[in-house]
Image (tube, helix red, strand yellow):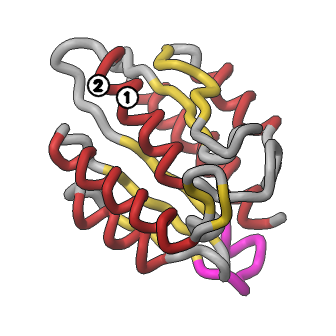
Amino acid sequence: AQPVTAVKNAVDLFMEYVREVDVADQVGLAFYCSPNGEGLLESPLTDDLDGVAEISRMRQAGHYNGWTNIGAGMTVAREELVHNARAGAYKMIVLMTDGQANWCDGRYHPTAAQNYVLDEASLCQEAKIPIITISLGANADTGLMQEVAETTEGTHFNIPGGTTIAQYS
């Protein structure tokens, strides 16, 4: 439960930062574990930072299902940015996960799921959308998240498992 709480706290902190810089940024929220196992746009790009943070707070690990289709969440996020971001806006994705990609094409398939993540990272790189990856906890695939960040010229942050609540904060 603590890595998920850390993700929610990170979302709150990020929203606070966006409020403080006050440059009319928009944020959206995509999930990689919808009821059908695909990506889900929970909130399109908006300036309603409190609303996005509230949606994040209401979701739990495995909220829709227990699978992790990270590539599908990345696809939804990329498509939202490409099609709906303001012209000239700087686009980026912040990808937070406490697990490993393991669902693809409607079934449990870790290899295909990891390949999907890497293919999507390449598409984000082509679209000039860097991905900031944050892996939380002992079960997060830090190697995959590092590769996604490097591919897209983003940055990877790792919050390892086995740390105290104070260390997570």
CB-based contact (under 8 Å), mark 1 and mark 2: yes
Closest to the observer, 51 or 34: 34
Closest to the observer, 113 or 100: 113
The local secondary structure at tag 1 comes to helix
Q: Is residue 120 left or right of residue 51?
A: left
The local secondary structure at tag 2 comes to helix
The amino acid marked with disc number 1 is Glu
Q: Quadrant of residue 144?
A: bottom left
Instruction: Please give the residue where the numbered disc 1 appears in the rendered image.
Output: 79
Instruction: Please give the residue where the numbered disc 2 appears in the rendered image.
Output: 82
Whole-percent x, y for residue 103 in the image: 62, 59
**Where the C terminus falls, by quadrant?**
bottom right
Q: Residues within 10 Å of mark 1 (few under 14, many from 20)?
A: some
Instruction: State the extent of the magenta-drawn residues as a range.
Output: 160-169
Q: Is residue 135 left or right of residue 98?
A: left
Vertical placement of residue 58 versus 161, above or below: above
Q: Is residue 95 left or right of residue 151?
A: right
Q: Please give the name of the residue rendered at 64% of the width and 58% of the height, measured from the top-left corner.
A: 68
The amino acid marked with disc number 2 is Val
Q: Please give the name of the residue rendered at 69% of the width and 48% of the height, measured from the top-left corner.
A: 8
Closest to the observer, 55 or 167: 55
Whole-percent x, y for residue 134 in the image: 49, 62
Q: Please give the name of the residue rendered at 31% of the width and 56% of the height, measured from the top-left corner.
A: 119
Whole-percent x, y for residue 92 in the image: 32, 39
- Residue 69 forms part of the magenta stretch: no
Vertical placement of residue 100 versus 38, above or below: below
